[in-house]
Amino acid sequence: MRIIKRINHNAVLCVDSKGHDVVALGSGIGFPDGSNEVELQRIERTFYGVDDRYLDLMKDIPSDVLGFSAQMADVIRGVLSYELSPNFPLVLADHIAFMIKRTRGGMMTNMPLSYDIAQLYPLEWKLATFVIDRAESTFDLPLKRSEVTGVALTILNSVNSDTTTAEEGVAVERILDGVTRTVEEKLSIIIDRDGMNYARFATHMHYLLRGLRTAGLSDKQDEHMLRQLKNEVPDIVSCALDVGAFAEREAGIHLGMSEFVYLAIHINRLYNAAKGGEVSASQEKSI
C-alpha cells in the first residue's frame, strides 16, 4: 500500500488498492526509508474510516497500548449487537494510555456514575471489567475497580446511533457552549474546538449532563484530592467551580466531589493545550 503520511514509527496512513484511506500498524513501518510503499506482510492491523483528528492523537499513544486496545476493541465489537464508531479503537487507546499514566503517577480518582452504569448497562460493564483485568496483567498495574466505569463510558460514548432527542441535544449543546465560554473567560484562553482535548472534554460533558439529569447521583467525597487540587492548580479549581455553578444554574444539576475532580482534569488539559505547555509533574500527580 502507498504511504501518504507517517504518523509515528509504528503507524502510517495509507491508500489501499481501492483508493480508501486506511491507518496501518506494524513494527517499524513508519520509519523513513526512502520508500512510499509498505509491504502487506509488515502490516499487523488496519483501521478504516478514522477521523483525521485522531491521527495526531496516535503520535502520543505507545504502540503497545495501541495494539492492546485494538485487540480489546475486536473483542468488544464481537460481543455487542450494535455498531461502534470507526474511531473506537483509538478512543479506547487514548483512554487506556491516560489511565496508565494516571496510575503510574499516583493519581487515583473515584469515577462517578459507577453504580448507575453497572445497573443500566450490564453487558458494557462486563466488557469493561474484562478490559481492566487484561490491562492489569498486560501492563503490570494495580488498577482500581472504579476504572471499569471509564472504559464502560468509552464504549457507550462510541455507539453509532442517535439516542438523544433533538430537543435534548440542543439543550446539551447550548450548555456545553456556555461551559466552554466560561472556561475561556475564566482562564483567559482560546480553546481549539477541533482539538482532541476538547473532544474529550465535550464527550465527558455530554454524558455528565445527560447522566446527572436522569439519575439521582450521590456526592462521593474526596477531600484529600480536593486539597491537592487547590494547592497545585488553584486557578483550575476556581474555573471548575464556575463551570459547576453554570451547570447548576442552567441545567439544575449539582456536581458531586468525584464529578468535580474529573471535570477539573479535563479543564486542566484544555488549559495546557491552549497555552502550548506540558502538564507539570506536580500537576499530573494531582490531577
Image: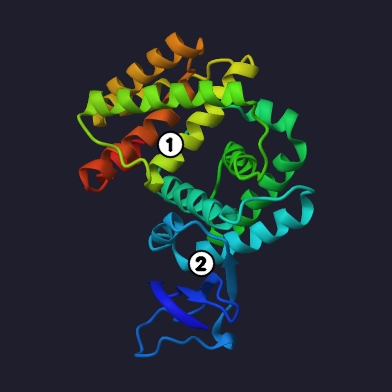
Point 45% across, 12% down: residue: 250
Count of labels in the image: 2
Badge 2 element: helix
Q: Which residue type does callout 1 highlight? A: Phe
Q: Compared with residue 212, is residue 264 higher up or lower down, i.e. above or below?
A: below
Q: Which residue is mark 1?
A: 201
Point 24% across, 44% down: residue: 280
Q: Residue 116 in the image: x percent, y percent?
A: 67, 26
Q: Which residue type does callout 2 highlight? A: Asp
| Left or right: 100 in relation to 45 | left
Q: Residue 100 in the image: x percent, y percent?
A: 47, 51
| Residue 105 in sight from this viewpoint | no
Q: Give the numbered dot on residue 106.
A: none
| Residue 214 in sight from this viewpoint | yes
The image's colour scheme reads: rainbow
Q: 217 or 56, which is in the foreground?
A: 56
Residues under numbered marks 1 and 2 in contact, where contact means CB atoms less than 8 Å apart: no
Q: 65 or 53, which is in the foreground?
A: 53
| Left or right: 31 in relation to 253 | left
For the residue carrying disc 1, how many other residues have a C-alpha within 10 Å: few (<14), some (14-19), or many (20+)?
some
Q: Residue 47 in the image: x percent, y percent?
A: 58, 66
Q: Compared with residue 193, is residue 45 higher up or lower down, i.e. above or below?
A: below
Tell which circle, 1 or 2, labels the residue nearer the N-terminal end: 2
Q: 182 or 113, which is in the foreground?
A: 182
Q: Which residue is mark 2?
A: 64
Point 64% across, 18% down: residue: 214
Residue 32 in which image quadrant: bottom left
Point 55% across, 52% down: residue: 92
Q: Compared with residue 156, is residue 58 higher up or lower down, i.e. above or below?
A: below
